[in-house]
Image (spheres, rainbow, N blue to C red):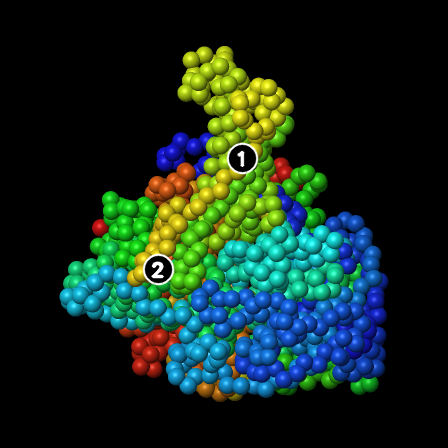
Amino acid sequence: MTDPGKFRYIGKHRRAVEHRRFVTGQGRYAADIQLPDVLHVAIVASPHAHARIRSIDASGALAMPGVHAVLTGEELCAHTDAMLPGVDAPQVKRFPLAHGVARYAGEWVAAVVADTRALAEDAAEAVIVEYEPIDHVVDPLAAMEPGAPQVHPLHGSNVIFRRVFNWGEVDEHFAQAPHKLSYRVHWARSATVPIETFAVSAWWNDATGILDVWASIQMPKYPDLLARALRLPGNAVRVHYDVDVGGSYGVKRGIKHSVLVGYLARKLGRPVRFIEDRLENMRGGDMQGPDRVFDVTLAFDGDGIVKSMRMRAVDDIGAYSGRAPLQLGKPVGAIVGPYRIASVEYDAVSVMTNKTPQEAVRGFGQSPTNYAIETGMDKVARFLGLDRVELRRRNLIGKDEFPYLIPSGTTYDSGDYATVLGKALDAASLEQIQRQRDELRKRGLLAGIGVSTCLEPSGGNSAFEPLFNPKNTTTTWMDSCLVRIDLSGSVTALMGTSTSGQAHETLVSTVVGEILQREPDGIRVLHADSLNALPSNSPVGSRMAIMLGGAAAGAAKKLRAKLLRIAAHNLGLPEEQLSYDGGDVVAKSDSQRRMSWDNLVEIAHRMFHKLPEGTEPGLQEKFVWEVPTGGKMPTEDGRVQMYPCHSFESHVVLVSIDPDTGKATFHRYVCGHDCGVMISPDVVHGMTYGGIAHGLGAAMMEKFVFSEEGQLLAGTFMDYLLPSALEVPAVTIVDHCTPSPLTEFGQKGSGEAGYLGSPAAIASAINDALAPVGASIDALPMTPQAIWNALRRASGGQRVSPAHSEIPEMEKA
Amino acid sequence: MAFSRLMNISINVNGVVRQAQVEPRTTLVDFLRDTLKLTGTHIGCEHGVCGACSVLLDGEPVRSCCMFAVQADGLSVTTVEGLAPERGRLSAIQDAFCEKHALQCGYCTPGMLVACHALVARHPRPDEAQIREAISGNLCRCTGYQQIVDAVQHATAQESSHD
Amino acid sequence: MKAAPFDYVRAEGLDHALELLHQHGYEAKLLAGGQSLVPMMAMRLARPALLVDIHRVSALQSLDVSDTAVVTGAVVRQRTLEDEVSLHAHIPLVAAALRWVGHGQTRNRGTVGGSLVHADPSAELPLAALVLDARLRLTSQDEGERSVAAGEFFLGPMFTDTRDTECLTAIEWPVWDARGTGCAFDEIAIRHGDFAIASAAAQVRVDASGVCRRAAFGLGGVDGVPRSFPELAQRLEGQRLDDDLLRDVAEDAAAACEPGSDLHATAEYRRHLAAVLAVRVLRRAAQSAQSSVRSV
């Protein structure tokens, strides 16, 4: 099972099933769903970062033609329940519309409903809101000071969560360590910013008592949370998962949009639709990502062995909390990266400010953490005069040490980090890019090589929920699949959650085809809706190859077993004497004694008299399963098995910087990647390329910039800059495979591939380029301005010219 | 606020003349999606940066969010739904996108395909630099562009047996 | 982001457009390519009551070439000029600038005149017009045609000398002798196609012995309007264009600018870039001029 070469369909090039509809414009995105007489919503948003709402006069808006309603927070909050944070902070209540107080500029204050979106926008301009501005705070460190303006006074503090974890003998290791090195890095507030904004339509039917919902959603427990907030029973909400989602990478958690629209649909008795426009999305869509200051100290010896780490991560989550604080928790499961660091003190601080709320972003906090760790490894190497690759090799967990238990309680399942790093260096090749770097330097440019070695935890176990909130004893993190073979012998599989580009239909049909030994292209995969779906926790945490793949395999195996049982019964032979061959069942001793797939299918569906006793008619099996290694609560001292499987990536990058302008250019980009057995290599590579582009954006140009007044300055695509095909370089991916012992085929997850290691590698390269002139940069994004500032600081304001490198040459071990 | 006059327009869309009455402020993309129900063209930003709304206007790629439908009166528009040579077949580029995995969520894909078709009409054998330049006005958050470049090179390296 | 309501008329000809402007004044706005105007209307930053569409007025689409000037109708599309390779030898600086203007898709609709009237301080065509000392022809129903030098046209960010009832009808781009002329355009932006953080344009002509006979250069994005430096350029005339001289002139030009700060760049950084880019374009223009002396 673990030898990739043994598979029929797994690991092979195969065209994604989904693509057929996307390339012809036949996708069905939330905004494409046609509903009769649908009404449209536009938002009235707060212009102030913090203000009391004195009054809302909607009379002018309501008088306009085509306007059906203007909803305010007062009404909405009286009839719905608050959305609560992922941590224990019941006073930090959140509703779709502000209630009495607006806590960030862009917060939704009123919703206008009209015949068309254009009319709704016209009417929104006519809504008159009287505000009384109050003191605001936008800096998270300032927000932690006593006397700072309180974002949620009833909570008693702007710190919504803080816990200091101590795993292992931190004090002792620090006392014994010959060297200690401290540094600070800033991970700027960026996000995945999908090209499709959040869109949701809802339609309430009085007769059936069902609220139908079509949304661009990627969110665990979305139907339940929606029903709860709307005070509906769970079986009154039907979320249609067959809506194509135009990218999410974590952020499409539009629960507030959905509560708003669901409420309006019930109130007005007509379908209601809200498609965020880009301005609403950027400012008030609540989809901004981690916004962190890391203060790290590493304790190490003269050989560069890093023994212990103290890390404080302060994360600015904005004015309200969804699951954002938990993004400090997930990295606990890979807090030492790929290294043998023996003890860790981790101080996780989640702070509220009067800014747009934070939401889950690809990696759920792991990429910023990797950036912080990798920055430290480079600094240790520089400090000791050691080559950065060699330094890593000395610290990497060795391939014979798996399964490897890290101080915070997570066991890494398998890996071979040194080999992946070596493959990436070979592919670059290191010698070639060193020569290139030297040539660039001779031309008067600054040039540097960056390297990163980063963990990519996968499998999605919500162990950070009970870790950060002892009142939340959730340990179930499951997924499912139902597979049917119909009367005609065609195979259909059902999955119970949404898809946003991960090619789940392709994944499931490949897996089911592999087990049943039937052509995957003939296997249809459908998305159930939330009323007829089996349990799922949605495609987060890089989990679907493992969990949905595992569930599909489980269901298919049950079907295969049933076919064998039917054949055994009808051939009069014990099952051990039969083999399953492409859907037929054949006697091992005599190939003439066989039963065909069609025959077996017919018996199962039509010939009850030929079924073994106690057999259900038909051919349909479900498989629901819990995440491997899951189901356990954390220990008292906060140790927990986070995700089950651990993919790994190593990036090697060559950059140059024009010292006169600070503008950087990428010359070579290689990513070594190991996610165990790849079910679909095309899909995995696609994710990796895309993740690298995301990481490049976060590293070089993306930032939600806020003014001192709490105004979002980067609120359009003219100011929030997404990399285009001219900013993202050509990338070479080299694969490695250390199968997971925990999964059906040895697969690990790869949904966060590339993103988790690229900002670290790019920062490593930029700093390697800056080092010869004594400059460094420890904040993202590394814009031309930021790089130029770093150069000026180093030169004391003088004009900078590149000196010869004094950094030891990188050597291959 | 003034209620503007509706205007009659006639636009050839994917080979068929479509007539309608629209408000002047209706953008071309909203006309295509809401009036004609051709939802293949997508909206990403409504301010002319992301390119998801790209269509061919008289054969050249334009941002349909940066035009009012009335401006296109009398002109011809080709959307993603009109790129295939006939029903049941794909253009060489559409096919190459599938072969090379040049898409994931599919949201930017219609605009991307429009840009690539226009490129290949001008430069039948584009090199990597030309491809990247041609799609530089189409943002994608899924693919990192690599497989899109590969797809166009794949489509144009082959003998044109597709269309 | 749907625009506020407005009325729309397609101008049947220039006279029709001018009549409408005469009637409606500032309530009417001319619509050509719309690549700047339509997004502003989508964001409700612009709310004209009437749009007068001149994109198809053939009188505004002319292209006339002579030894002294290329006259482009205001509504000539950027793409048309980009594709009209025969013009590139006449107005190479405009050809160089066009490569930096937006993306191919925006150049398919955007017009030469539209960019000039929009007058974004970091836009490329206004800078090229200023450096070349282009003349802009403006016409109104009441006052007929007048001609304004580019230097007097750009008055502030997004603000020009165009009167409410006027239509920019054509631009005269001066043509320099081909022999010995070289030019360069450069810009720094975070991404290709973005508004420039800073930009620079230069055109020089040298004689057979390499001495500069004529020079013009300018900077964009580093002030409220594009800036050109005729007096500084005069210091180059009669000289050999060696690096020290170019550097001096470039530094003086940068010092004369008053750049602003925004989320992408500080004033200090912009001023620094101004000097760097000015030297670069002067240097490249000089090199290109030297080659052209030899080759033509």
Q: Quadrant of the C terminus of chain B?
A: top right
Residue A17 drawn at (x, y percent): 57, 41
Please say if A674 is above or below A485: below
Where does label 2 land, which residue?
Answer: A332
**Is residue A185 something that shows in the picture?**
yes
Please say if C109 is above or below A531: below
Element class at badge 2: helix
Q: Quadrant of residue A258?
A: bottom right
Left/right placement of residue A452 relative to residue B113 reads left
Residue drawn at (15%, 66%) of the image:
A176
Please say if A399 is above or below B138: above
Residue drawn at (66%, 48%) of the image:
A26
Residue A629 drawn at (x, y percent): 37, 47
Q: Quadrant of residue A677?
A: top left
Q: Quadrant of the N terminus of chain B?
A: bottom right
Q: Amino acid at mark 2?
A: Val
Mark nearer the viewer, 1 or 2: 1
Where does label 1 land, which residue?
Answer: A621
**Is residue A449 something that shows in the picture?**
no
Q: Quadrant of residue A301?
A: bottom left
Chain to which the residue tagged by mark 1 belongs: A
Query: Which of the two residues, A761 or A517, is positioned nearer the viewer here?
Result: A517
Residue C74 drawn at (x, y percent): 71, 72
Query: Which of the two residues, A569 or A710, is positioned nearer the viewer here?
Result: A569
Query: Which of the two residues, C209 or A333, is positioned nearer the viewer here?
Result: A333
Residue A469 drawn at (x, y percent): 41, 63
Please say if A261 is above or below A17: below
